[in-house]
Image (cartoon, helix red, strand yellow):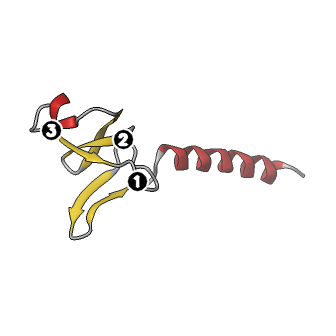
Amino acid sequence: MKTYARISSDTVVELFTTDGNMAEMFHPDLLWVDISEVTPAPQLEWTAHFGTLGWVFAAPEGTQVEKGLKTLANKWLTRISRQP
């Protein structure tokens, strides 16, 4: 199975895993990129740019995971600072 990212406006907008032929499955105007071997695997809302070395993907700054971890860290630090 291969995993593909659909790119629109330099952004990953959809992920799709299949053994099928993408050219037969979707309209040719849709841009699908094989990301099966890309590490780390691009996720939704990552930026996507094509350059001399091929496709380059990047996570958006301040992802939800980072925001969640920062929130937990702030709560933990607030509790510690309130202890006598």
Position in image of residue 36 (x %, y %)? 39, 48
The reply, left or right, for residue 66 in relation to residue 14 is right
Instruction: Give the residue at mark 1.
Output: 37
Q: Is residue 10 above or below residue 51?
A: above
Instruction: Give the residue at mark 3.
Output: 30
Q: Residue at x 54, y 50 (%)?
A: 66
* Farthest residue, direction bottom: 52
Position in image of residue 23 (x %, y %)? 16, 36
Q: Residue at x 27, y 54 (%)?
A: 48
Circle number at residue 2: 2
Position in image of residue 10 (x %, y %)? 22, 51
Q: Amino acid at mark 3?
A: Leu
Which quarter of the figure has residue 14? top left
CA neighbours of label 2 inside 10 A, class few (<14), some (14 to 19), many (20+): few
Front-most of 26 and 60? 26
* Farthest residue, direction right: 84
